[in-house]
Structure formats: C-alpha cells, structure tokens
C-alpha cells in the first residue's frame, strides 16, 4: 500500500513549511509542497492537506482572514467534504476557523482571538505548553495517541472563543473539543499557567463533526515530542477511518452568529490617523472584499476618541509619527488636519471620511469610547455592506464589535 501523500500549503507569509514537511516525512508519509497559486493538477492524488503556521498575508485584517477567503480554500473545503484530511496548525488553525471548515464546516462560528489573561491582552506568546487529547482516540485524524505532549506555542491570536454559547455545549456533546491545554500530569485547566492565551475550556484544538478536519494552535511539527500527532494522522488515513461516523452529528441546529451593526454617536473630539505611504493592510483587506464586490473602495484609519486637546496626544511619537502619518481631527461636522510643523490645526476639505464609516473594536475593551480601526467603505450600495459575509471581512463577530460611525 503506498504511503499517504500530504500537500503542505504555502500562503504568502507562512513560515513553518520546512518543519511541517519534515515532520510529515518522518511519520512515513509523502509530501507535496504547494504554493497557493500553483497548478491544482499537483493535488490530484493527495490524501490530505496540511496548512502550516506563520503570518499569512502578514495577518492583515486579522490572523487567517485573508487566506481563508482565497479561492484555494474553497477547493480545500470541497476536498474535506469528500473525506480528505485537512489539518491546520497555528496560522493554519486560524485559516480553518476563519474559513468555517471548523468547527461546523458552514459558518464563521468561532474566533482565534487576541491572547487574554484576567481580562487584559497579553500580546504575543512564545513558550512551551502541555496538551492532551480531550476526545476519543478515534474521534479525529490526529487524536490517536495517549498521555501528554510538550509543545511550543508562538502566536498573538490563539484564544479559542465564541459568543455562541449553544455551540460550546454542542462541541462538548459531539466530542469535537479535540485537544486541551493541561499540566504535565494531563489535568486540563483554564488557569493562565496552563492555558496562557485564555482559551475557553482550555481548548488547544477542535475538529469538525466528521473528524477529518482539525485546527490546533500549538506546534507539534517543531519538536520530536510531536511525532505521535503525525503518526496518528498516517494511521487514520491508512485505516480509511469512517468519515461519516454514526456516533456523531454531522450537522448542527444552531444558527451562526451575525452582526447587528448598531450606531455610535460621535464623541466631542475624534482623531483619525491615515498613512502617507500605501497602507498595505488596507489594500489587502480591500482586495479580500472585492472578491465579493469588485467596485468596493476602502480606506482604513486608526480611530482615537479624545477628551483633551489633540495637541497633547499628537506630540508623542509613540502615538503619531508625522513622517509617515497624517492626522485628522473631527469636532462634530468640522474636519481639520494637523500640521506637524506649526503644531496647529488647519481647515481640511479632504474626502477621507466620505462613505460608510464602521468602527471595529477587538476584545478586550473597556468602554464604548475605546479606540479601534475605522473602515470607510464606498463604491457599492450600502445594503450590500450589511451582508453577513461582507461584515465578517471587517471583523469576526465572536471577538470584535462593528459599529456604524455617524
């Protein structure tokens, strides 16, 4: 019997391809290195797909959002429906969550959100953790091992979370919480010493209902400790594990979380910061949105509500760099531009704020007035912007809020 053949997918910005290829080969499988824009004929005889870690598209918009909307992911979704294995580690997990392939396979049901401990964002984490299978050993493609595994993590957005509380209950009932963070003895815990990113239920990885798609945040490919993970993957494929297992529900009754785009009244002083040079994140998010609406045009700005003199805020280089940024100040309907040389406000006729203005704020935030990202959208009918698929480009409803700025 020939060895399983796995395609390791490389999107722009991924950086874990080499160790992923090595780990898969060491488990006795063949590999195919596949760039996102390669000829798909290379994939005709593969048994599965592995989406590695890194920073696809520089995490523009948010981690995994852009790659998840690449046409290749639609193809991989079709392959998953046909029963082929799909595993995503770290950024690969973020891509799978954003694509909807996990946990249900139809909607954006979760988020891998900013790392949070005790209500505060803790930034990028690079450390070692313990994980253990939290499901039956034959539940999913990579759960066929026992005990604990000591693995590295390296992510800024790795916190499994959802605002759909019914979904969490369903995942537990359907045995889809595949892996949990644990201590060395195997005891799972949400304690920050065990689950440093604040993931709900100490979730380190989840699978889809069929078990052939898995999203895992730690990196088993970076250490010999992770070898059993890939051996389990090989055994699953070789055993032709039943993709439709009668023990588990293959569909769910819950409705996906949707945005209710409310409005927010302007505060007395609002600061909008634009870039002088091309904003690559803005261009990439616009390109993702244009796959659905080709005429859409986007402007992305930093949004800071102020209660004091803007000059006090703008004089600090950590807040505003006049060599590469432009600051606009809005008081009611009046818009001025900050002149960094004279340190004075000047009247502005700029159209920078003309269009539908949406404010995105990511958890954790404390007040309605907290800063965020302002998207100014124009070029298409406003009602088209309100579609769930479009709004999900600008923010994940399980970790962010979108509000219409008047």
Image: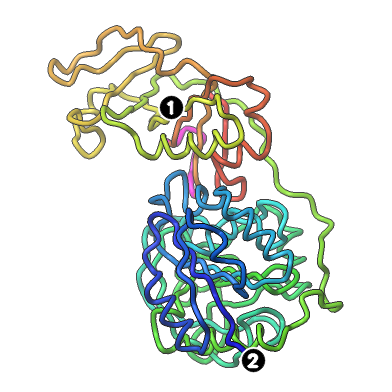
Q: Which residue is mark 1?
A: 299
Label pair 2/1, CB-CB below 8 angstroms: no
* Crowdedness near tag 2: few (<14), some (14–19) or many (≥20) residues, C-alpha within 10 Å: few
Q: Earlier in the sequence, mark 2 or mark 1?
A: 2
Q: Is residue 117 visible?
A: no
Give the Cα distance between marks 2 and 1: 55 Å
Q: Nearer the viewer, mark 2 or mark 1?
A: 2
| Residue 35 part of the magenta-drawn span | no
Q: Quadrant of the C terminus?
A: top right
How many numbered circles does the render carry?
2
Picture coordinates of residue 88, whole percent (x, y): 54, 68
User: Residue 186 falls in which quadrant of the image?
Assistant: bottom right
Residue 27 percent across, percent down from the top left: 50, 88
Query: On residue 1, which mark appears?
Result: 2
Image quarter of the N terminus: bottom right
- Which one is nearer the viewer's eye here, 172 or 332? 172
Position of 231 relative to 89 (above/below): below
Question: Is 95 left or right of 15, judged from the image as shown?
Answer: right
The stretch in magenta equals 364-371
* Res 327 quadrant in image: top left
Q: Is residue 377 above or below residue 260?
A: above
Query: Residue at image x 27%, y 24%?
Result: 326
Magenta span: helix, strand or loop, mainly? Answer: loop
Q: Would residue 385 be found to the left or right of residue 252 on screen?
A: left
Residue 4 screen position, x and y as percent: 59, 82
Q: Residue at the location (36% across, 38% down)?
A: 280
């Amino acid at each position: 019997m020939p060895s399983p053949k796995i395609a390791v997918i490389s999107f722009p910005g991924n950086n874990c391809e080499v160790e992923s290829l090595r780990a898969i080969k060491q488990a006795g499988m063949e590999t195919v290195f596949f760039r996102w824009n390669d000829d798909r004929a290379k994939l005709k005889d593969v048994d599965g797909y592995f989406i590695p870690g890194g920073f696809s598209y520089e995490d523009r918009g948010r981690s995994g959002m852009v790659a998840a909307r690449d046409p290749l992911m639609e193809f991989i979704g079709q392959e998953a429906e046909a029963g082929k294995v799909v595993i995503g580690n770290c950024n690969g997990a973020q891509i799978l969550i954003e694509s909807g392939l996990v946990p249900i396979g139809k909607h954006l049901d979760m988020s891998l959100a900013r790392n949070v401990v005790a209500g505060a964002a803790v930034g990028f984490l690079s450390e070692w953790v313990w994980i253990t299978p939290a499901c039956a050993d034959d539940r999913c493609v990579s759960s066929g091992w026992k005990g604990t595994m000591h693995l590295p993590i390296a992510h800024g957005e790795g916190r499994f979370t959802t605002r759909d509380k019914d979904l969490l209950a369903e995942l537990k009932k359907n045995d889809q919480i595949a892996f949990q963070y644990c201590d060395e003895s195997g005891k799972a815990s949400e304690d920050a010493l065990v689950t440093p990113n604040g993931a709900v239920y100490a979730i380190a990885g989840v699978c889809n209902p069929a078990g052939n798609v898995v999203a895992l945040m730690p990196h088993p490919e970076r250490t010999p400790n992770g070898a059993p993970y890939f051996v389990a993957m090989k055994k699953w494929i070789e055993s032709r594990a039943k993709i439709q297992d009668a023990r588990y529900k293959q569909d769910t009754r819950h409705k996906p979380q949707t945005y209710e785009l409310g409005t927010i009244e302007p505060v007395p002083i609002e600061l909008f910061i634009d870039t002088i040079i091309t904003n690559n994140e803005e261009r990439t998010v616009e390109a993702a949105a244009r796959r659905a609406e080709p005429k859409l045009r986007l402007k992305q700005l930093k949004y800071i509500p102020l209660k004091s003199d803007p000059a006090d805020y703008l004089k600090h280089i950590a807040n505003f760099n006049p060599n590469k940024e432009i600051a606009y100040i809005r008081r009611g309907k009046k818009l001025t531009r900050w002149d960094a040389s004279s340190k004075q406000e000047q009247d502005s006729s700029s159209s920078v704020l003309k269009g539908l203005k949406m404010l995105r704020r990511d958890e954790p935030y404390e007040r309605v007035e907290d800063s965020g990202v302002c998207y100014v959208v124009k070029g298409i009918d406003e009602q088209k912007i309100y579609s769930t698929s479009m709004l999900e480009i600008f923010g994940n409803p399980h970790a962010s809020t979108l509000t219409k700025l008047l």
